[in-house]
Image (tube, rainbow, N blue to C red):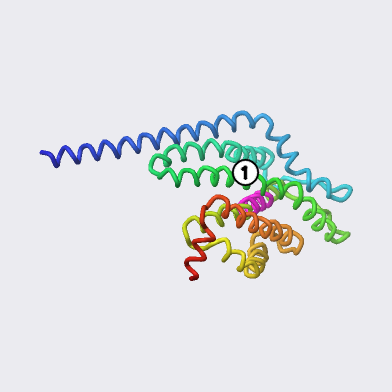
């Protein structure tokens, strides 16, 4: 009898967790839908802002085109959907955090909160860096390399896919400080060891940039250099957020 009661309590606990998870996911979905509804009337204007870095660099008479019949409608809507996800991301992550946080220790919560906020801000910073710094340089290079007899006219959907790929690449690349802090917090490495590995990181940054960016040296360099700077920032942040990280490394070496 007591065994059956214990099983029932466990089942109820699991059901309660599942119901809470469903509630959190529904709230997150509702936030995305609300942002999407607010952005939808401005889809054309938002796509115009996104395409401005390329349009400014097009030669005289050049323009963007829509190859598919439905592209003039679907492409701006696709952009608005992605923007809704990005804008609502802090609230979505908050809902996930509220579900997971009760199962963490206080020390883990104190470390996870700034890391979560840092990850979101760095992703936004990576997207902003791509738009304001990388796009003008890359598109100026691409359009200047077109032969004289070739009219530069980019399809709006392919352009969106291209810039979204760069946004994701730079947003993820800017997560280097977060990854560095996590590695130190887990005891996998130390700030001193990370400092000694700078040479390997430089080679790795340019190698990864070669695969994540278009096949030109400019965009690869524009991705690799911020990654190296953020790597140094991660070492400093690890010393501040993980107490005794360097002392732990000294004890391990001794």
Which residue is farthest left?
1
* Left or right of 95 on screen, residue 120: right
**Residue 104: percent from the left, percent from the top?**
40, 44
Q: Which residues are magenta?
A: 161-172
Camera-side residue: 167 or 109? 109
- What residue is rendered at 67% in x and 39% in y? 76
Camera-side residue: 133 or 149? 133
**Residue 241: percent from the left, percent from the top?**
55, 50
Q: Is residue 191 above or below residue 158?
A: below
Residue 79: image quadrant is top right
* Left or right of 147 on screen, residue 78: left
- What residue is rendered at 64% in x and 31% in y? 39
Q: Secondary structure at mark 1?
A: helix
Q: Give the main secondary structure of the magenta stretch.
A: helix
Quarter of the image with the N terminus in it: top left
Circle 1 residues within 10 Å: few <14, some 14–19, many ≥20: some
> What residue did someone put label 1 on?
121
- What residue is rendered at 54% in x and 44% in y? 116
Does the magenta-highlighted stretch encompass residue 249? no
* Left or right of 73 on screen, residue 149: right
């Amino acid at each position: 009898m007591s065994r059956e009661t214990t099983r029932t309590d466990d089942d109820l606990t699991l059901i309660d967790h599942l119901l809470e998870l469903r509630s959190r996911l529904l709230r997150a979905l509702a936030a995305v839908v609300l942002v999407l509804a607010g952005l939808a009337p401005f889809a054309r204007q938002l796509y115009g802002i996104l395409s401005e870095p390329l349009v400014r660099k097009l030669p005289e008479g050049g323009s963007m085109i829509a190859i598919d019949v439905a592209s003039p409608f679907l492409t701006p809507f696709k952009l608005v959907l992605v923007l809704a996800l990005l804008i609502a991301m802090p609230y979505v992550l908050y809902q996930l955090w509220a579900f997971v946080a009760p199962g963490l220790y206080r020390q883990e919560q104190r470390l996870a909160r700034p890391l979560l906020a840092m990850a979101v801000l760095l992703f936004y910073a990576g997207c902003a860096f791509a738009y304001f710094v990388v796009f003008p340089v890359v598109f100026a290079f691409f359009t200047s390399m077109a032969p004289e007899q070739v009219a530069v006219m980019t399809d709006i959907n392919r352009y969106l896919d291209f810039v979204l790929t760069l946004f994701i690449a730079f947003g993820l690349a800017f997560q280097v400080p977060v990854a560095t802090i996590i590695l130190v917090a887990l005891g996998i490495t130390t700030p001193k060891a990370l400092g000694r590995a700078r040479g390997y990181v430089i080679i790795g940054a340019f190698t990864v940039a070669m695969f994540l960016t278009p096949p030109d040296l400019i965009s690869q360099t524009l991705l690799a250099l911020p990654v190296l700077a953020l790597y140094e920032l991660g070492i400093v942040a690890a010393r501040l957020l993980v107490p005794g990280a360097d002392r732990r490394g000294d004890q391990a070496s001794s």
